[in-house]
């Protein structure tokens, strides 16, 4: 399965129908949740049959495509399943709540009720049942047959369509020639075994002042007023710009490693736990987890191999002699007393990750020669990957 995200440009009439569909989907979800609470046990399919009775009692529900309403039943049980998984993991969870006005942001067409027409112009036409024709900007070719369309309204007021296709491609496995190990961090987001450095762009610091000013100005507006709504949209667009800038950076960096390496090794760190720690805000801004996720997807989709390695000991273990050298967090240089190597600690971690990745795939790294040892001691800095990021295609 593959998902494409395209911008929608609905007219005012169509947009009012889309808002109406969101509100009716929310109403259906609340009614199904109320019906679910009145039963001790009821299956998903039994509850779905109640939609027929709801359409009889509330004729306005016929304004929405039938399968779109059925998807709300699927959404309800998906939320129940997610609560059950959270409870199994030890988290304290409550009951599902009824959704208030404006809570729903998406509605879906599954299998049918939609049609994409290629016009050959800048914007194509997406036809949705019970809504009408909507202009859609398809900026890339779509592979496979469209199986589902999810329409979403962003807080900034923009509409997007997510087209889910069933594309099936057999990607041939690459011949293993180029192998790289990547270490993640907060100072340098990525530091690989080829001594390429990707500095932390710290986008949140770049936009922090603009966001703070917008939030202060909006807090002075009367709740429910048109001025407050205008500033809410303005603030949402600033956050959207921050998210788009960060996403663009992630795609460029991940595409670089997918195109230039056959095997990529990274640590199997649980970044969600690290985000709850002292430097949680910085970890979330660095997006280490999202970068690893995109590298995994892109490397495997191009026929490469992604190898997760055990993260324990990669920082303190020397990549040459495996001697454990304890270092404080502020000590940025790895000095091994046994083999007398002195390199940046992140570079040492990247080399150790590469060594573990080679072992994982069954390719032992040969013993280092004297020339390679001398090369590690030199302080020559290769060009930073972040400097080349703007020239890389997303």
Image (cartoon, grey):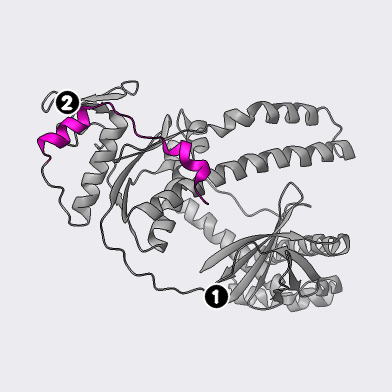
Q: Is residue 394 left or right of residue 384?
A: right
> Position of 62 compared to 243: left or right?
right
Mark 1 is surrounded, within 10 Å at the Cα level, by few (under 14), some (14 to 19) or many (20 or more) other residues, namely some
Which image quadrant is residue 246 in?
A: top right
Number of other residues with Cα within 10 Å of mark 2, as a class: few under 14, some 14 to 19, many 20 or more: many
Which of 16/262 is in front?
A: 262
Q: Residue at x 49, y 37 (%)?
A: 286
Q: Which badge, 1 or 2, comes first in the chain's sequence?
A: 1
Separation of marks 1 and 2 at Cα, in angstroms: 54 Å
Residue labelled with disc 2: 336
* Residue 375 lies in the magenta-colored region: yes
Q: Secondary structure at mark 1?
A: loop
Residues shaded magenta? 368-394
Q: Is residue 89 visible?
A: no
Foreground of the two, 118 or 381? 381
- Up-down: is 286 above or below 30? above
Above or below, 168 relative to 264 = below
* Position in image of residue 343 (x %, y %): 25, 27
Residue 359 point in image, percent of width and height: 18, 51
Task: Identify the residue at image location x=59%, y=49%.
Answer: 94
**Residue 134 among magenta residues:** no
Q: Are marks 1 and 2 in contact (CB under 8 Å)?
A: no
Kindly tell me whether residue 332 is visible in this rendering. Answer: yes
Residue in front for this viewpoint, 372 or 114: 372
Residue where numbered disc 1 is placed: 144
């Amino acid at each position: 399965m593959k998902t494409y995200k395209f911008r929608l440009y609905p007219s005012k009439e169509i947009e009012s129908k889309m808002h109406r569909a969101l509100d009716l989907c929310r109403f259906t979800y609340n009614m199904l949740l109320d019906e679910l609470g009145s039963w001790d046990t009821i299956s998903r399919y039994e509850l779905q049959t109640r939609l027929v009775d709801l359409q009889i009692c509330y004729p306005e529900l016929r304004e929405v495509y039938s399968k779109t309403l059925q998807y709300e039943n699927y959404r309800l049980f998906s939320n129940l399943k997610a609560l059950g998984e959270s409870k199994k993991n030890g988290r304290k969870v409550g009951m599902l709540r009824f959704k208030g006005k404006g809570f729903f942001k998406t509605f879906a067409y599954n299998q049918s009720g939609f049609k994409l027409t290629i016009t050959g112009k800048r914007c194509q036409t997406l036809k949705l049942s019970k809504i009408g024709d909507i202009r859609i900007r398809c900026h890339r070719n779509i592979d496979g047959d469209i199986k589902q369309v999810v329409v979403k309204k962003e807080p900034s007021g923009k509409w997007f369509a997510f087209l889910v296709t069933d594309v099936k491609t057999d990607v041939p496995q690459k011949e293993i020639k180029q192998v790289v190990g990547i270490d993640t961090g907060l100072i340098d987001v990525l530091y690989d075994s080829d001594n390429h450095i990707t500095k932390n762009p710290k986008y949140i610091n770049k936009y922090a002042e603009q966001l703070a000013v917008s939030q202060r100005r909006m807090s002075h507006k009367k709740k429910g007023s048109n001025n407050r709504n205008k500033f809410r949209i303005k603030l949402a667009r600033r956050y959207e710009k921050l998210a788009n800038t960060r996403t663009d950076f992630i795609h460029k960096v991940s595409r670089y490693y997918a195109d230039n390496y056959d095997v990529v090794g990274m640590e199997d760190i649980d970044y969600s736990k690290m985000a709850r720690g002292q430097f949680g805000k910085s970890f979330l801004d660095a997006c280490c987890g999202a970068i690893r996720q995109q590298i995994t997807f892109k490397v495997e989709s191009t026929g490469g191999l992604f190898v997760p390695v055990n993260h324990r000991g990669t920082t303190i273990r020397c990549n040459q002699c495996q001697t454990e050298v304890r270092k404080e967090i502020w000590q940025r240089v790895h000095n091994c007393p046994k083999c007398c190597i002195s390199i940046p600690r992140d570079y040492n971690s990247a080399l150790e990750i590469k060594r573990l990745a080679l072992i994982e795939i069954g390719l032992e790294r040969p013993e280092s020669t004297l020339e390679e040892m001398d090369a590690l001691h030199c302080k020559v800095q290769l060009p930073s990957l972040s400097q080349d990021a703007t020239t890389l295609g997303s």
